[in-house]
Image (spheres, rainbow, N blue to C red):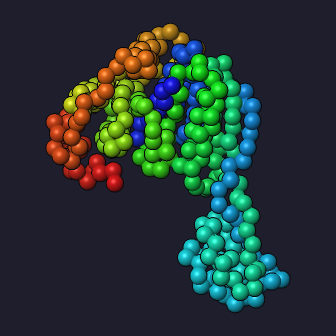
């Protein structure tokens, strides 16, 4: 079984739409929506929720007015200014470290588990689907992503027919993205011909290189800027990334979303052909017919890839990941 993460760096490049389309071409597969801060794969992946559970992380702290002596020790120790002058703990500021409760001389501070979101185990016509809804302003998205992937792994042990899992990744290169790509077999980078997308593509490529992940790349909305699309293709070739396909701007993506469908159920136009080509390349990899990307030096070492998108990555600090 292979895990393939669909990622982008920049948000809004079309990861979720392409994830749903690729899954729609499989006979059997599983899906995990790892973009837990803004999960929306469930909007276009027809599914039935089988199980729902709380995502618990951290604690909620409160002060008992009857036991509190108003000594002020908790306020002096709190590094997050979460305790007001009248000794009420602000749950938004509180990080749940527990220092206040540990040092309270009257043991007036108690805590209980904090429910930060929901985890859903669902079923689609092609296999299991795991997604979540994180509470407003809640953190630990990386932990939630890891829990979703763990649930998927447990489920796949029961079903040997499933050969691939598609992970709909979050934007950026932070903790949720790292939790998404850790241990995956390959990543499909979905980018677009814009300055911000290219900037994030370079950062993402460097991160995937550190994790030794096989990379594929496609350009969505490729026809909005032909010059930048050519630069991206050149960068892909220079950096040893397997280029799969261009997808031109297609308003049918939006129409399909409004119908709660993926685009492969909606049309068989040139966009569908392009997505089938991407799926074909990934299928070859899943079946072991694709070769690994050659080792390419870091972009900080001055590889030829540094020149392919020259005007956007001339300064190394623009592409630093760590």
Front residue (pair 221, 300): 300
Q: How many marks?
A: 0
Q: Viewer-proximal residue, 252 or 319? A: 319
What is the quadrant of residue 295 in the picture? top left
Q: Residue at x 60, y 28 (%)?
A: 156
* Residue lying at 21% horizontally and 50% vertically, measured from the top left: 315
Q: State the image coordinates of residue 159 (x, y, percent, origin top left).
A: 63, 23
Q: Is residue 101 left or right of residue 248?
A: right
Quarter of the image that includes the C terminus: bottom left
User: Where does the image place residue 28, in percent across and percent down from the top left?
Assistant: 58, 18
Could you tell me which residue is drawn at 22 percent across and 36 percent down?
A: 296
Where residue 138 appears, x then y in whole percent?
61, 55
Point 43% across, 31% down: residue: 185
Between 15 and 322, the one lying in front of the other is 322
Q: Is residue 232 left or right of residue 278?
A: left
Residue 94: percent from left, percent from top: 62, 68
From this viewpoint, is residue 133 visible?
Answer: yes
- Quick check: can you spot residue 15? no
Q: Residue furthest top?
A: 268
Which corner quadrant of the image does residue 218 belong to?
top left
Compared to residue 287, the image places residue 118 above or below, namely below
User: Is residue 204 shown above or below 156?
Assistant: below
86 vs 18, left or right, is: right
């Amino acid at each position: 079984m292979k895990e393939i993460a669909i990622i982008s760096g920049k948000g809004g490049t079309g990861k979720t739409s392409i994830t749903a389309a690729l899954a729609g071409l499989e006979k059997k597969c599983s899906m995990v929506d790892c973009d837990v801060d803004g999960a929306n794969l469930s909007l276009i992946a027809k599914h039935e929720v089988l199980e729902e559970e709380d995502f618990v992380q951290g604690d909620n702290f409160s002060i008992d007015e009857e036991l509190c002596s108003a000594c002020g020790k908790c306020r002096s120790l709190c590094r997050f200014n979460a305790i007001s002058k009248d000794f009420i703990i602000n749950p938004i500021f509180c990080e749940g470290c527990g220092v206040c409760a540990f040092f309270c001389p009257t043991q007036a501070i108690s805590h209980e588990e904090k429910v930060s979101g929901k985890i859903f185990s669902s079923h689609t016509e092609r296999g299991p689907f795991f997604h979540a809804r994180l509470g407003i302003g809640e953190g630990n998205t990386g932990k939630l992503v890891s829990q979703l992937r763990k649930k998927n792994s447990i489920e796949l042990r029961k079903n040997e027919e499933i050969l691939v899992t598609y992970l709909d990744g979050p934007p950026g290169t932070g903790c949720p993205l790292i939790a998404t790509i850790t241990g995956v077999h390959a990543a499909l980078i979905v980018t677009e011909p814009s300055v911000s997308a290219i900037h994030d593509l370079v950062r993402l490529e460097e991160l995937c290189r550190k994790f030794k992940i096989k990379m594929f790349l496609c350009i969505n909305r490729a026809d909005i800027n032909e010059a930048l699309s050519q630069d991206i293709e050149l960068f892909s070739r220079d950096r040893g990334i397997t280029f799969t396909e261009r997808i031109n701007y297609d308003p049918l993506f939006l129409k399909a979303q409004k119908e709660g469908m993926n685009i492969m159920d909606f049309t068989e136009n040139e966009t569908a052909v392009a997505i089938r080509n991407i799926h074909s390349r990934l299928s070859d990899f899943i079946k072991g017919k694709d070769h690994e990307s050659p080792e390419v030096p870091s972009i900080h070492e001055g590889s030829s890839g540094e020149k392919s998108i020259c005007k956007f990555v001339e300064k190394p600090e623009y592409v630093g990941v760590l």
